[in-house]
Image: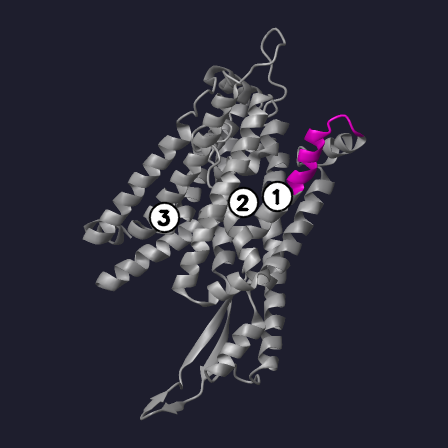
């Protein structure tokens, strides 16, 4: 292991790529802590302390998670990577229903580049909308509604509410999203790993030390000063990570054999390969979908705070610790797993391509029987994969029972899935580049 790490930094190209990636991460983190113009940081810090672990933090927890805490700091990168993630998901879903996008997807590299360009445009449009909504809520004191001074008066977190000052804040946050996209593409082209994934990993991992220490501080009044609970949470987190790695690496390999055929004077085919079907074929997308859907009742309750619906939502859906909320969350994750797999994996198309090039699954006829077999296997794999995702998504709720502060528990839900997934992918890329140079893997 130590030799492999030494080989990483001895390799000239790989060494430069890693250093470049680290430099981009430093720039990204600086932008996440740099406050946007017209923000009263004294009042903002006071409101953040008052709202720690409260309902408002829970309402914006998903966006705040992907921004690494930059959202509730109202920094230049307050929107984080969320507009790009939303744009990517929208384009991916539209590829199934819009023939033009489906044609571009099948064109290869040129079509993918065009879809990427559309994703950038949509990201900027969503960034303008998100920044406008967020700044408007900040101006109207709707982000920290219960934030009060010592005399009971509300604490404004924006100095000037004129149209020009608000427009500058919106443009600054939108430009921050554009810079994040640019940094991510630079990392993809000149660094290590997928740029956007690495930046999400950085933002989430940056909150781990603070969250762990907050658990220790919250229980410092105990006999051991909170150290036992701190070590217990750390041990549980490591076990959760091991379980996630085990499930993320699990796959069903369907054997495929290609018949021999003559093309001119040369013989082609006769090879054996396999189709890897992962247990978790959908990744973390179903958890994001389910979380977004469950934020809608909270937003409706915020818009109509005096109605009976708002009172019902505040009881069952705001804090996220009610059994009805968790059952709904689990069922939505399972449902979105099946939905996402059905639109991203097309058994009929794969069966047609195999038949076109002379491929077949041993014991299964080519064509429609192959498509039915792939659909059968995929549905059986999606069942345990969806249950696994649902359980991991509910880990913060279980932590609330053990620790008493689910907002501070870092090893669960979307965060740990992204951290482990991106970490595995980045290590594989480093390993493949090392094997190209010295036939020696990173973990060997």
User: Which of 299 and 124 lies nearest the eye of the viewer?
Assistant: 124
Q: Is residue 118 left or right of residue 295?
A: left
Image location of residue 305, percent across then percent down? 73, 27
Where does label 2 land, which residue?
Answer: 414
Label number found at residue 52: none
Q: Which residues are magenta?
A: 294-307
- Is residue 353 shown above or below 223? below
Where does label 1 land, which residue?
Answer: 291
Q: Quadrant of residue 30?
A: top left
Quarter of the picture holding the C terminus: bottom left
Q: Few, some or many C-alpha atoms within 10 Å of disc 3 (few <14, some 14-19, many ≥20)?
A: some
Q: CA–CA distance between discs 2 and 1?
A: 9 Å
Helix, strand or loop at label 2? It is helix
At 63% from the left and 59% from the top, the residue drawn is 339
Q: Few, some or many C-alpha atoms within 10 Å of disc 2 (few <14, some 14-19, many ≥20)?
A: many
Asked whether the residues under the numbered discs 2 and 1 touch, taking CB atoms below 8 Å apart as contact, a structural biologist would say: yes
Give the mark toward the camera: 2 or 1. 1
Q: CA–CA distance between discs 2 and 3?
A: 23 Å
Q: Few, some or many C-alpha atoms within 10 Å of disc 1 (few <14, some 14-19, many ≥20)?
A: some
Image location of residue 107, percent across then percent down? 44, 67
- Is residue 340 shown above or below 362? above
At 25% from the left and 63% from the top, the residue drawn is 436
Helix, strand or loop at label 3? It is helix
Image location of residue 192, percent across then percent down? 32, 50
- Is residue 127 shown above or below 249? above
Label number found at residue 185: 3
Give the mark toward the camera: 1 or 3. 3
Q: Would residue 52 be visible to someone looking at this image?
A: no
Image location of residue 123, percent across then percent down? 48, 44
């Amino acid at each position: 292991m130590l030799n492999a790490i030494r080989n990483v930094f001895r390799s000239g190209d790989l060494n430069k790529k890693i250093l470049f990636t680290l430099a981009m991460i430093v720039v990204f983190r600086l932008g996440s802590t740099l406050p946007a113009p017209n923000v009263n940081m004294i009042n903002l810090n006071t409101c953040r302390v008052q709202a720690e672990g409260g309902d408002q933090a829970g309402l914006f927890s998903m966006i705040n998670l992907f921004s690494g805490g930059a959202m509730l700091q109202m920094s230049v990168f307050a929107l984080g990577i969320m507009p790009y993630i939303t744009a990517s998901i929208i384009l991916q879903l539209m590829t199934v229903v819009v023939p033009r996008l489906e044609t571009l997807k099948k064109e290869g590299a040129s079509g993918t580049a065009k879809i990427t360009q559309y994703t950038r445009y949509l990201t900027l449009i969503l960034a303008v909308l998100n920044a406008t909504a967020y700044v408007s809520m900040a101006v109207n004191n709707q982000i920290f509604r219960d934030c009060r001074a010592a005399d009971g008066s509300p604490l404004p977190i924006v100095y000037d509410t004129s149209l020009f000052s608000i427009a500058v804040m919106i443009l600054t946050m939108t430009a921050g999203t554009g810079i994040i996209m640019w940094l991510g593409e630079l990392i993809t082209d000149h660094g290590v790993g997928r740029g956007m994934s690495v930046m999400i990993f950085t933002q989430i991992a940056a909150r781990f030390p603070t969250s762990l220490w907050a658990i220790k501080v919250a229980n410092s009044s105990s006999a051991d000063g909170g150290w036992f609970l701190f070590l217990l949470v750390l041990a549980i987190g490591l076990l959760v990570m091991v379980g996630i790695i085990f499930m993320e690496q699990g796959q069903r390999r369907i054997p495929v054999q290609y018949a021999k055929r003559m093309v001119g004077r040369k013989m082609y085919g006769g090879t054996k390969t396999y189709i890897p079907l992962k247990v978790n074929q959908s990744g973390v997308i179903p958890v994001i979908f389910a979380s977004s859907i469950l934020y809608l009742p909270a937003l409706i309750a915020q818009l109509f705070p005096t109605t009976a619906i708002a009172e019902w939502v505040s009881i069952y859906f705001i804090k996220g610790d009610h059994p009805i909320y968790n059952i709904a969350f689990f069922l939505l994750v399972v449902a979105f797993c099946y939905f996402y797999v059905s639109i991203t994996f097309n058994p009929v198309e794969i069966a047609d391509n195999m038949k076109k090039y002379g491929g077949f699954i041993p014991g299964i006829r080519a064509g429609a029987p192959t498509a039915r077999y792939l659909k059968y296997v995929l549905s059986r794999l999606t069942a345990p994969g969806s249950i696994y995702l649902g359980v991991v998504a509910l880990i913060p709720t279980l932590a609330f029972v053990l620790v008493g502060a689910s907002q501070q528990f870092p090893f669960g839900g979307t965060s740990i899935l992204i951290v482990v997934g991106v970490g595995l992918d980045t290590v594989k890329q480093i390993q493949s580049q090392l094997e190209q140079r010295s036939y020696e893997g990173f973990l060997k």
